[in-house]
Amino acid sequence: MNDYALITGATAGFGEACAKIFAKNQWNLIITGRRDERLQSLKNSLSEEHGIHVITLCFDVRNQEEVSVSLDSLPPEVKNKIGLLINNAGLAVGKGPIDKGITDDWERMIDTNVKGLLYVSKAVIPMLKENGKGHIINIGSIAGKEVYPGGNVYCASKHAVDALSKAMRIDLVEYGIKVTNIAPGAAETEFSIVRFKGDTSAADSVYKGYDPLIAIDIAETAYFAATRPAHVNLNDIVIMPTAQASATVLHKN
Ligand code: NDP
Ligand code: 8X3
């Protein structure tokens, strides 16, 4: 049986694109998210098109009980074939000066991007250790390398992901578990619609005047990282649109 890739946040954007590329290459999948209808429809299309086994787990990464019960419910023959965890579920909510920040937005970002990633990792790492190998790909951000105006708490949460990627690499090296941090710049997904709370014109304006990254760019990068030879690990990958030079410098027409 082929290995399973466990992908969080597979109902949209990078996670969905990762599911498609790994499925195309005959990996079995465990796909997660909160929107079960989207998970079921992705499962049906990928298993039909590629003949792979797809398991859906519907949970909110912020709820540790849900995370651990869901992941523990996997059958032993699946647990011991998990070769890859992509910690992708995440979001930004709001953008503005720190003193105008909304506490609930801050909590959603910290609880999802930092604590959610930790809860999923805590549940999956014992399975990888048991298997004596494995790979964790954390989706960080350029916001985890630099800060930008109005990005404060989102940037802090992604700096935490950056730090956790480094820390996991140290803590897991003796078990042969690879850890890769992928730090994308501007990519057009549902990200900005979520950030601007459904304001599609604010979201669209983020991507006007240049060619942003698209989800498949990140999925191809994750797939490349996941398919290096056993002795090679890509530690940290920063990927931006050609029109972007840093978190704050975008060349727009
Ligand atoms: P999307 O909004 O398109 O997708 C986000 C995914 O995360 C969805 O599948 C969503 O699923 C899932 N998710 C969000 N909150 C939760 C939660 N509480 N529990 C479970 N799943 C959750 O955004 P992207 O694909 O762009 O974002 C993916 C990752 O990439 C995020 O970590 C983001 O911070 C990061 N990133 C994005 C960049 C961009 O410019 N787009 C650039 C750099 C990094 P559901 O709603 O069904 O739960
Ligand atoms: C998403 C990219 O620049 O909006 O992480 O922070 S950015």
Image (cartoon, rainbow, N blue to C red):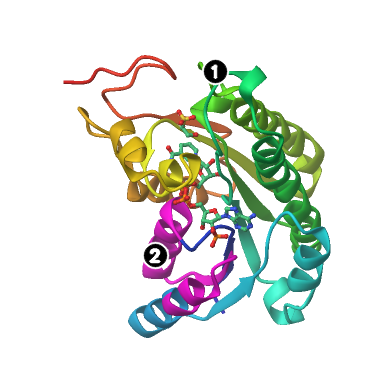
Q: Is the residue indicated by label 2 positioned so its CB lies within 8 Å of ligand 1?
A: no
Majority secondary structure of the magenta segment? helix
Q: Is residue 53 above or below residue 229?
A: below
Q: Please, what secondary structure does the residue beneath circle 2 have?
A: helix
Q: Quadrant of residue 179?
A: top right
Q: Nearer the viewer, residue 164 or 42?
A: 42
Q: Earlier in the sequence, mark 1 or mark 2?
A: 2
* Amino acid type at image mark 1: Glu
Picture quadrant of residue 131:
bottom right
Residue at image position (72%, 50%) is 116
Please provide the residue range marked out in magenta. 12-41
The one nearer the camera, 108 or 136, is 108
The residue to which callout 2 is attached is 20
Q: Circle 1 — which element?
A: loop
Q: Residue at x 44, y 60 (%)?
A: 16
Q: Residues within 10 Å of mark 1 (few under 14, many from 20)?
A: some
Q: Nearer the viewer, residue 96 or 233?
A: 96
Taking 176 as reference, is 49 above or below it? below
Residue furthest to the left: 253
Taking the image as shown, residue 97 lies to the left or right of residue 211, namely: right
Closer to us: 26 or 65: 65
Residue 102 placement (x, y as % from top left): 66, 33
Residue for point 44% across, 63% down: 22
Calculate the distance from the C-alpha at mark 1 to the C-alpha at mark 2. 30 Å
- The x, y position of residue 39, in whole percent, is 50, 73
The answer to which quarter of the image holds residue 100 is: top right
Q: Is residue 156 magenta?
A: no
Q: Which residue is mark 1?
A: 146
Going by the numbered disc 2, the residue's amino acid type is Lys
In the displayed structure, 38 sits above or below 233; it is below
Look at 38% across and 47% down and name the residue there: 189
